[in-house]
Image: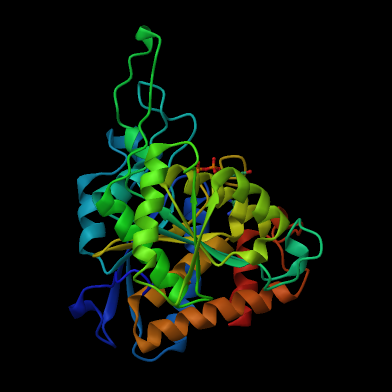
Amino acid sequence: MNNTETKPTESAAISGKAWNIAVLPGDGIGPEVVASALKVLRVIESMTSGLHFNFQEYPVGAAEYLRNGDPLPEASYAACCSADAVLLGAMGLPQVRWPDGRELTPQIDLRERMDLYAGIRPIKLFHAEDTPLKHVTAGQIDLVLVRENCEGLFSSRLNHTHPARGEVSDILRITRFGAERICRAAFRLARQRRHKCTIVDKANVLPSMVFFRSVFDQIALEFPDVAADHVYVDAVALYLLQSPQAFDVLVTENMFGDILSDLTAGLVGGMGMAPSADLGEDYGVFQPSHGTAPDIAGKGIANPIATILSAAMMLEWLDTVETRQGAHWIRKAVELALADPANRTPDLGGNLTTEQMTDKIIAAL
Ligand code: ATP
C-alpha cells in the first residue's frame, strides 16, 4: 500500500516487468489459502497485458523446523529480501515448540528482521449477513487497524526467563523513533480515507502509553486535515462492538493490535475475512491476519478470502497502473461473489470448499 511511504524499489516499479514474488505457504491452512491466491493472481495476469509474475516458493514454518531445525532458513529469508514482494500463508503449529515452551513464530522474526513496522489490517464488511452485529449494513464497517509490529509488549518475547526465581516480567517498549513512524503511517493512511485517526492506548495506567500518546499528539500536528482522537484499549473493545462505524484508522502497539485484529475480524465474519500487509521502508509481506488454523487444516474448507484480499493489497503496494487495476478487480470480484448468499465457506455458515469459493471469485473476475 502506498500509505506508509513504503514502496518497491524504483527499478521494480517499471510497468511491464515480471514481478518476482517470494511465496511462503508455511503450515496448516497456509498452503491451501496461498494456492487460492496464486490461482486468482494468475487469472489477473491473464487479464492484463504487460503484467507478469514469477512465483517462487520457499520453505518456512514449523514443518521446516522439524525437517531442518530452522523455521526461517537463511536462504528463504534472503529470497524474501531480494523479491519484489512476499506472499505468506501462515506459520507455526501448537504442538511444535522451542524447548522453553513458546511456539515457533517465524512470521514475527520475519517482521522484525525486515523491519516491517507497519501492520496494516483493513476490516470491511462486504455483506450484512456476515456480521454478528444487529442493524449494521454492508459498508458500515470499514476501518483499518494499524499495528506497530517491531516493539511494544512483543519486544520481550526473546528474553530468557527465570521462573525458578518466582517472578517473570515482560517489558512494553515504546521508542520515539518507533512511535513516530507508526503514527505517521496511520495519519497518512487516514488522509487517503475518511480523515480520522484514533490512537488505542492505556495512557491512564501505563507510562509507556502516556509516552506513545504524547508522540501521537505531536505527529497529529503534521496532519491538521485529519481528526485525531484517543481511546483506551478496554473501551475500544466495547465501542467496536457498539458502533464500529465510528472508526476509520486505529493505531496501536503490537500486543493490543494482535488482540484487536481478532476482535475486528469477528465483526466481519471471522479470521478468514481479514487480510493484512506488513510494510517497512523497503519491503512488503502480505498475509492473512489469521494463523495456521490447525483445527481445519487439511480439510479443504478454509476461507481463502483473507489471503486473496492480501494479494490485492500486494498488487496495490506494487503500485503500477496494471497492479492497481488488478487489486481493484480482485476486491470487486470478492464483493460480487459474496453478493450471492450461497457463496460461503463453513466459517461463514456456507458449505463451499476452499477451491469452490476460489472459483466463485474467479468466475466473478
Ligand atoms: P495465531 O496466534 O497464529 O495468529 P490464532 O491462535 O489467532 O493464530 P487462527 O489460526 O487464526 O488462531 O484460528 C482462529 C480460529 O479462526 C480457528 O477456529 C480457525 O479455524 C479459524 N480460522 C482462521 N483462519 C481461517 C480461515 N481462513 N477460514 C476459516 N476459519 C479460519
Q: Quadrant of residue 84?
A: bottom left
Quarter of the figure with the C terminus: bottom right
* Residue 23 appears in the picture as rendered: no
At horizontal 52% and vertical 58% (from top left) the residue drawn is 33
Residue 218 place in picture, x, y as percent = 34, 61
Q: Quadrant of residue 152?
A: top left
At horizontal 49% and vertical 42% (from top left) the residue drawn is 202
* Residue 286 appears in the picture as rendered: yes
203 left or right of 184 in image: right
161 vs 107: above or below: above
77 left or right of 30 in image: left
171 vs 140: above or below: above
Residue 350 place in picture, x, y as percent = 76, 59
Judging from the image, the colouring scheme is rainbow
At horizontal 39% and vertical 57% (from top left) the residue drawn is 216
Quarter of the figure with the N terminus: bottom left
Residue 268 place in picture, x, y as percent = 66, 60
At horizontal 81% and vertical 65% (from top left) the residue drawn is 135
Instruction: Report the number of numbered marks.
Output: 0
Residue 340 place in picture, x, y as percent = 76, 74
As drawn, the residue found furthest toward the bottom would be: 49
Q: Nearer the viewer, residue 269 or 213?
A: 213
331 vs 276: above or below: below
16 vs 359: above or below: below
